[in-house]
Structure formats: structure tokens, C-alpha cells
């Protein structure tokens, strides 16, 4: 059986801008970066980590579109995190609301979706 997500991969247009964004606003830290020899238009692959969660950034040098990518984080202080990101000017795609709980312990949790620098969707719950 699968036990967890290993990483979420996002195509990024500006590698350093994306690294700076996720380190500053979400607490991720870059821990590995490498070239990808022999793969046309793929310049670098970068890995960032937050606890056990890993993001992989694929830095393409062509105009590859980034559609439909998202990931979800759990917040232990939803209202504070929401306000901090909103105050930072990060676009809100879906305002905070209480969704139907997937498990009983999620009853009353809030959900919000923001948009990252490459159009990716960033959901968080808590």
C-alpha cells in the first residue's frame, strides 16, 4: 500500500523566484539541485523540503504550460497563515470556507486556495 506522497512536482519559469517564494512564505528550504543531462529544455531540477513534504521544481527553458498543478498543506493556525499570505499580496483563488470533512477529525476545518508565481494552486486546510 502507498503510505504518503513523496513529492509534488511543479514546472517553473523562474527557478530562483520560485525558490525564494516558497522559502519566504511557506518555510520550505532548498536541499538539492541537479542538472538533467540529455533532456532537451529541462535546465535544472530543484528539491525543497518542509518537514516530510518535498516539492520538486522542474525548470524548463521553453514555454511549457503549467496547468492543473496543486498541493495541499495542513495549517495549525489557519487564520494567521491566511492573513499573512493575503497581506503579502498572494492572490486568493478560493476564499476560506468550511468544506465537508473527509474524516471526522476534519469537522470544522477551513480550506483556502492561493495562486503561486507560476499559476500553480496552493491549498491549505486547518
Image (cartoon, rainbow, N blue to C red):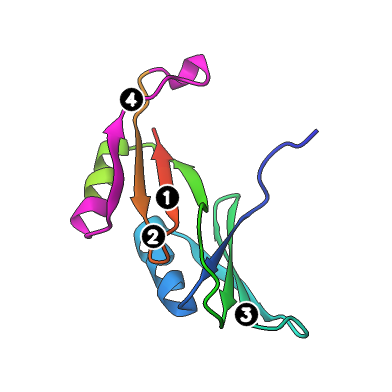
Q: Tell me if mark 4 has few (under 14), some (14-19) or many (20+) residues whose alpha carbon lies within 10 angstroms of its own.
A: some
For the residues bearing labels 3 and 2, Cβ distance under 8 angstroms:
no
Give how far across and how far down residue 32 sits, in percent: 63, 73
Tell me the crowding category of disc 1: few under 14, some 14 to 19, or many 20 or more residues within 10 angstroms, Cα based: some
On the rendered structure, is 43 left or right of 66?
right
The magenta region covers 85-107
- The mark that comes first in sequence, 4 or 3, is 3
Pick out the residue farthest to the right: 1
Residue drawn at x 67%, y 79% as measured from the top left: 34
Q: Which mark is residue 122?
A: 1
Query: Residues under labels 2 and 1: Cα distance?
Result: 7 Å
Q: Which residue is mark 3?
A: 44
Q: Secondary structure at mark 1?
A: strand
**Badge 1 or badge 3: first in the primary sequence:** 3
Say few, some or many: other residues with alpha carbon within 10 Å of mark 3 (under 14 / 14 to 19 / 20 or more). some
Q: Are marks 1 and 4 in contact (CB under 8 Å)?
A: no
Please report the residue visible at 38 percent of the width from the left and 36 percent of the height from the top.
76
Residue 45 is situated, as x and y percent measured from the top left of the image, at 63, 74
Mark 1 and mark 4: span between their CA atoms? 17 Å
What x and y, as percent, mark residue 15? 49, 77
As drawn, the residue found furthest toward the left would be 87
Q: Is residue 122 above or below residue 18?
A: above
Q: Is residue 11 magenta?
A: no
Q: Which quarter shows the N terminus?
A: top right
**Spatial separation of the CA atoms under disc 3 and disc 2:** 19 Å
Q: Which residue is mark 4?
A: 98
Q: Read off the residue under disc 2.
A: 116
Q: CA distance from mark 1 to mark 3?
A: 22 Å
Amino acid at each position: 500500500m502507498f503510505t504518503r506522497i513523496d513529492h509534488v512536482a511543479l514546472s517553473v519559469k523562474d527557478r530562483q523566484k520560485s525558490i525564494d517564494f516558497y522559502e519566504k512564505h511557506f518555510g520550505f528550504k532548498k536541499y538539492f539541485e541537479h542538472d538533467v543531462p540529455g533532456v532537451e529544455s529541462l535546465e535544472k531540477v530543484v528539491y525543497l523540503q518542509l518537514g516530510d513534504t518535498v516539492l520538486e521544481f522542474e525548470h524548463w527553458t521553453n514555454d511549457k504550460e503549467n496547468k492543473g498543478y496543486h498541493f495541499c498543506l495542513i495549517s495549525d493556525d489557519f487564520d494567521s497563515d491566511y492573513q499573512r499570505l493575503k497581506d503579502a499580496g498572494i492572490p486568493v483563488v478560493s476564499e476560506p470556507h468550511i468544506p465537508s470533512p473527509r474524516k471526522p477529525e476534519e469537522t470544522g476545518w477551513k480550506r483556502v486556495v492561493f495562486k503561486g508565481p507560476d499559476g500553480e494552486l496552493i491549498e491549505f486546510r486547518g
